[in-house]
Amino acid sequence: MATVTMEGLFYTKDHEWVKAEGNRASIGITDFAQHALGQIVYVELPELDEEFKVGDVFCVVESVKAASDSYLPVSGKVVEINEELEDSPQLLNEGPYESWIAVVEMEDPGELDQLMDEAAYKAFCEEEEANA
Amino acid sequence: MDLMKTSLFPMYGKYGGKMVDYAGWSMPVEFSGLTLEHEAVRTAAGLFDVSHMGEIEVKGSEAAAYLQNLLTNNIETMHDNQVIYTFMCYQNGGVVDDLLVYRYSADHYLLVVNAANMEKDYEWMIEQKKNYQVEVINLSSEISEVALQGPKAERVLQKLTDTDLSQIPSFYLKRDVKIAGANCLISRTGYTGEDGFEVYLIHEDAPLVWEKILEVGKPDGVVPIGLGARDTLRFEAALPLYGNEISQDISPIEAGLGYFVKFDKGDFIGREALFAQKQDGLKRKSVGFEMIENGIPRHGYTVLSDGKEIGFVTTGYHSPTLGKNIGFALVQAEYAEMGNTFEIQIRKRTAKAQVVSKKFYAKNYKK
């Protein structure tokens, strides 16, 4: 199954995506991630105003099979959470790029340089699929 | 170490199997998706590769006496072609394994054991042979096993055999049944809470039988099922998993499975310890619980009451059939009463849960 990616986003090796606008970053999980997880039945959101460093677990996405940690791609403070996911976790399956999990006020937008662009991420996913 | 592969390993790619390492085997955890597979077994039927399971043959003039001493259930009341579920325990009441016993005749049995425990079981069985006139033969590496489970299992399997399957009652077996021309041992047993069959055959025949069942079952919605749904299915039906509900450290009495421990049959390994647990009252009990607050309980999570640790979750899931967050926990006996509430530690927070009946899902066995 071909993985869907989106232009203009930044990506991590753990299959999170980041959409940056100024110092605000919306963060979600990618199509690859939601496929790998299967039907998502619960999302444990971070709390508002919670502060994280890059690489911290900020959210847990659960399928029937397992709980899977999501890592924050950039350091910062949580300024918005997508509460809709509490009642409708399946939105992450239905439209992984439409449903962000949280918005973070970035401490250092320079951290985005460490992430992959669409082309690099696409290649990364193909490699992961070949190794699966 | 290289992972072991079942005779059906070459088929998985075709059906999109996602592979995992399970007890030293490379096994499919999922095909079309856990929830879809789970639902297929509850409403139609699903096909499982369970070739990793171990099979140990016991025969000889004292086979029954040997097994009567080795196992907790009553072997001497079994009929020919009957199958029973039982535990094999240590002297201290801890569980070596849970297993099925197939009786061919009074002096000939087949034991079907967990893959992860097979070698340990076999060694334990040899150790307990002592002076019994009995042969214990490990057939595990020679036998493939598939399970067809679900309300349409009989109807589908019937298309591939002349044997009248409706004549095989639940927990009975039949030998030398031809399935798609292959010689099989079949039993009306399973690990899903649904009606269904387990089919034992030689490796060479397994791929063809697997393909044929999926082919003739297609109109009825038969799909291949991975280990993921195998676990959620058995869990909803309150069937224990070794290493979760029972283990070397959790006895069948603590797990609430005393029905399969027959104290009135005479002596057996572990009797004294298990009887003492029953007589003196249990310190820990297995309970079913349902989450009141948000969160999915998982195997190994801590159970708390007023911040004090009182036990742990043995299995927990977001139940595909019921849509609820439910689980089994082993807790200190004073917290086991129906309706009692406690908390489950879920990562950094705790969430309230309530003790409910373990019968989350009523088994649909053929009467």
Image (spheres, coloured by chain):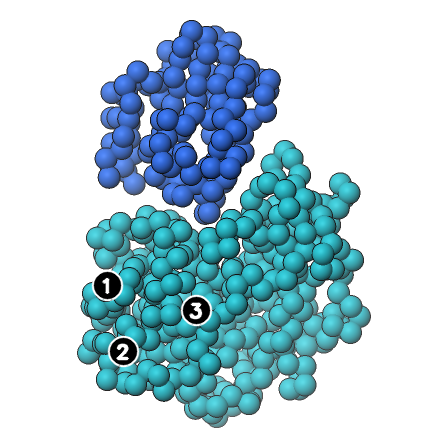
Chain colours: A blue, B cyan
**What's the CA distance linking mark 3 and mark 2?**
17 Å
Q: Is residue B236 above or below residue B93?
A: above
* Mark 2, residue position: B158
Q: Nearer the viewer, residue B96 or A115?
A: A115
Q: Which mark is residue B53?
A: none
Q: Tag 1's secondary structure? A: helix
Residue at 58% x, 46% y: name it: B297
Place of residue B310 in the rendered image (x, y in percent of width and height, measured from the top left): 73, 50
Image quadrant where residue B268 sits: bottom right
- Residue hosting label 1: B218
The residue type indicated by label 1 comes to Lys
Q: Amino acid at mark 2?
A: Gln
Residue at x 78% of width, y 74% of height: B279
Secondary structure beneath dot 2 equals: helix
Query: Picture coordinates of residue A13 (x, y %)?
Result: 37, 26
Q: Are marks 2 and 1 on the same chain?
A: yes
Whether residues under marks 3 and 1 lie with C-beta atoms below 8 angstroms apart, the answer is no
Please tell me in which quadrant of the rendered image residue A45 appears: top right
Q: Earlier in the sequence, mark 3 or mark 1?
A: 3
Dot 1: few (<14), some (14–19), or many (≥20) neighbours within 10 Å? few
The residue carrying mark 3 is B194
Callout 3: few (<14), some (14-19), or many (20+) C-alpha neighbours within 10 Å?
many
Q: Position of residue A105 (x, y in %)?
A: 51, 12
Q: Label 3 lies in what chain?
A: B
Q: Secondary structure at mark 3?
A: loop
